[in-house]
Each structure stands twice: as structure tokens, then as C-alpha cells.
Image (tube, rainbow, N blue to C red):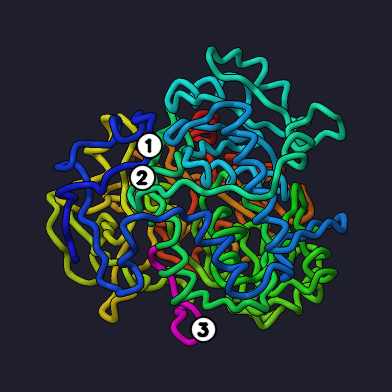
Amino acid sequence: MSGNKPTRLHPSAHQDTFCRDNLPPADQWPDLVFDLPELRYADRLNCAVELIDATAERLGRDRTCLITPGGEQWSYGDLVDRTNQVARVLVEDHHIVPGNRVLLRGPNNPWMVACLFGVMKAGAVAVTTMPLLRAGELATVADITRPDLALCDHRFLPDIVSAEITGMPIVAFGAATADDFTAQAVAKPASFEAVQTSSDDVVLLALTSGTTGRPKATMHFHRDVLAIADTFSAHVLRPSAEDIFTGTPPLAFTFGLGGLLVFPLRVGASALLIEKASPDELADLIAEHKVSICFTAPTGYRAMLASGKAASLRSLRRAVSAGEHLPEATWRAFADETGVHLIDGIGATEMLHIFISAADDDIRPGSTGVPVPGYQAAILDPGGRPVPAGTLGRLAVKGPTGCRYLNDPRQTAYVQNGWNITGDTFVQDTDGYFIYQARSDDMIISAGYNIAGPEVEEALLAHEDVLECCVIGVPDEAKGHIVKAFVVMRDGGADGEARAQELIEFTRHRIAPYKCPRVIEFVTSLPRTATGKLQRYVLRGVAT
């Protein structure tokens, strides 16, 4: 099936119909593309069973699955048993029925994984939340998703308790007490008959991290979870059962969910789960555990190089960068110092994971890549018409996954004429490669010129003393806007106006003069979301 909107959904296994009831109307869905044979899944499908039980049966229960820096190690058999026990506690003790929502709160560790997949085996719907969310933010998430229960790491209880969410019992896990959820789970039999959900039953409500505004709950099916492994992972990343994965994104961030769980589990690899790590600590853990595949943001890779940790990364054979634009200067510096060619990619919470990327000899530094097998992409003008190669336009994507917001009027802004409109401005070259310009609402118009902030950032990052930077447009009476750069220097300081002029002159040798920053402000850090995305609106608010 190619380019179709849903005509019917398979009979649901959900007794609680909240998710089906709140799907967008069929005429607001994007076209869905299932051209690859491996994307034609069975009507009845539980993704937790496919990722854990089927892999354990295929490769053996004793195979290493999850590792922690502290030395804890779970096999695939352990994870099968723990997820079954979690599902039993949910069903037998908390009366969870298929379709109920369970909010999850905690860092990346094995018990969080067991809770996530135990929820899925029980036929319930996981509501994943960032560990850094505070009480007001958690209350908003609950208002949108209406969870029936919360499973919370005992160290992260204060904010969720303070949120005072009506009708949502909170159960703590991970504490060494007799009444802890984990103690209740290990006391249960390690068998459970997973609910035979429909392939298009909702299994995950992932909240958009966003940089401002009320979050949106994106609705993902059981088949979607497998589709990201059978597209980007299988065709671009190409992992094997011998790989060891790690990275910094939270499991609540779909970049982390795919890179640290779905992709390794699909092939029988193992994952080093890190609750929290600085770039220095991440590099040391990669060396200690001989990690072969890493997922983190561009700033993480750049910071590891800045700390002199290139030698600690020798075990890597793959390194994936996403979450924000990867500057060409970072790609080249990482390749020069480690020999590893960063795999850039653009994805979206709405699409679940990466849909444009390239690896190995297909990489062209400075471009994001080409559509991942299974996906289609185009550059469109404001009227929805394709534009010629080399022309700025809106990125539009379709594939086996697509945007379905939970009861949100913004659905019609993201999905237009069957395309997912990601909110990014791109150019496609004559060879079909997609080159990022900016977020569509971040384009700077100065004296009639269109200026892409990331291009200016790349010019600044080429300077050996610049650690990171962010470029925005600030109002100007004569030009409409001028380009302003916020710059973090490697030594954490700056030398005032003379140094600012040096950086401005430096950029003039790399980009057209009209694109160069007119003002530079030195800062010690840049504001970011919990997923590492720059909060440009914060800088706009303080810009003068």
C-alpha cells in the first residue's frame, strides 16, 4: 500500500477506548506508505513481544541485553521475566485494562525499561515523560493524556506528588523497600500472556518537547515502533547483535527510545543505560564498555572533542547525531579526530524517529542526507507545490509513520495534503540531498535577504575558540532585523568588543557579508530543552 489515508482500523483490543476516540479524523491523517515488504505487519501485533520475547527465543535468553555503569546486567531472559512480572502487577494489583494510560517518570535504567514494556505487554498505553519535568508541566501532560496510573522512580516523586493530579494513583519503583513496585513485581510469577493488541492500537503517547507553548501528544501504534527499526535502523544504521549501544537522550525522547531500546532489541544487541552523564563521563563510559554505537546531540560530540576525549571513542563504529542541526564543522572535526563519520539525521516526535539521513560513503558533509528507505520527502512552497532544486521551501515527509495528535487542532497545521509538514526550511540539491537551512519560523529576513541562522552558526563554529553558538534575528528599524549571535567560548570567557569584531571578520571570509552577525554577545551557556534543543525564543526575549 502506498500513499493511502486510513480507510479502516483493525478491531482494537482496547477496553478503554480513550485513544481510538481521540485519534484525528481520517481525512486529517497523513498519507501512509508501506512500500517495503518488511513494513507489512500482521493485523495482531504487540511490539513488546516482538522486541523482547521473539528476540530472546531467536538468539537465546542468556544473551546480554541491558547494562548499567554500576555493573548491573540483565539478559534478554531477565527482561522477558521482568516485563511479564510488571504486567502482572499492573493487571492483578492495579486493575489496568487494555487501553488505560500509564504515565512513566524516571531516568534511563533497567527497571524503567521493564515498566515501559510491561505496560505495553498489558495492552496499556505508555505516556513517557522527561525526568526533568516539574509539577506544572506534569499536570499539563496529565490533563492532555488522562493517565490512570503513574509509575515513578522513587527519586523523582516530589514533583509528581506536588502536581496533585486527580484520579492518578502514583506508584514508586526502584527503592529497596518491601512495598516498592519492584519488590511486588519480583514476587510474581514470571509468566504473562501478553495482550494481542491490534497493529494499529495506540501503544505510546509521546509528548512533543517543543521550545515553547503547550505540548502536543503524538499517538503511535504498535506497528510504528517496529517500523522505525525496520527503516532507519535496518537500512542506514545497520547494527548487528554484537553491537553495544549507548547515548544521552532520555527514553521519553523518541530519539532515545529508538536509539537506546528499539534498535538494539530488534537485532539482539545490548544497551548501556546511563542515567546522567557529562560529555567527559560519556566518553569515559564508551571507552570502559567498548561501546560501538552512540546516540547524542551535536553539542555532545563537539564537547567530547573539546575535552580532549577523542582517544576514548576508538571503540565506536557508528555515531548518530540528531535533535538539532549538525554543523559541517563539527562533522569534519569529529571525523578528523576519531575517524568516525557522524550519521546526521532529522526526525520528529510526530514521525517517531529519523526519516532523512545517510551513512558511510553516502554521507555528504553539510547535508542531512536523503530519505530513509520507506520514506518520501519533498520541498514545497507555501501553496503546497514542489519547488525546483536549489530553492528554499518547507520540508514535507510521508512514510509508514506519521503525525496523529491526540485531540489537538494543530493536526491540520502539521498535516497538509497528505504530507507531514515538519516546520523546517530545507533546500534539495540536484542529486536529491536535503540541506537544512533553519526552522521555518527561525528564518531571518534582513534588508530583504533571507538568512538561515544555522549557516551563520556554522561559520562561527569554524573558529577554533568557539564552543557553541546560537544566531537569531533582532528587530532593527532600518533593516527589519539584523543578525545577532550568542557565543560560548571554549575558555568560558571573552575579551569584549575586540574579540567580537574578530569573530565577525572571521565569518566574512566564509559567508556573504549580508549574512554575518552585526552583534555578538558572549555567554557562558545556551538555554536548552530537556532534549537538548536550543530555546531560541528565550534568547529572543533577552535580545537587545
Q: Position of residue 104 (x, y in %)?
A: 60, 35
Image height check: is 223 above or below 137? below
- Mark 2, mark 1: which one is toward the viewer? 1
Q: Position of residue 286 (x, y in %)?
A: 77, 68
Q: Is residue 437 left or right of residue 499?
A: left
- Name the residue type under label 3: Asp
- Name the residue type under label 2: Asp
Tell me, yes or no, whether the two marked residues, 2 and 1, touch with CB atoms within 8 Å.
Answer: yes
Label 1 crowd (10 A; few <14 / some 14-19 / many >=20): many
Q: Is residue 290 left or right of residue 516?
A: right
In the picture, residue 111 is in which quadrant?
top right
- Name the residue type under label 1: His
Residue at image location 42% in from the left, 61% down from the top: 513
In the image, the segment drawn in magenta is 355-364
Q: Which residue is mark 3?
A: 360
Q: Is residue 363 magenta?
A: yes
Specify which label sits upstream in the sequence, 2 or 1: 1
Label 3 crowd (10 A; few <14 / some 14-19 / many >=20): few
Residue at image location 20% in from the left, 55% down from the top: 31
Image height check: is 357 above or below 534? below
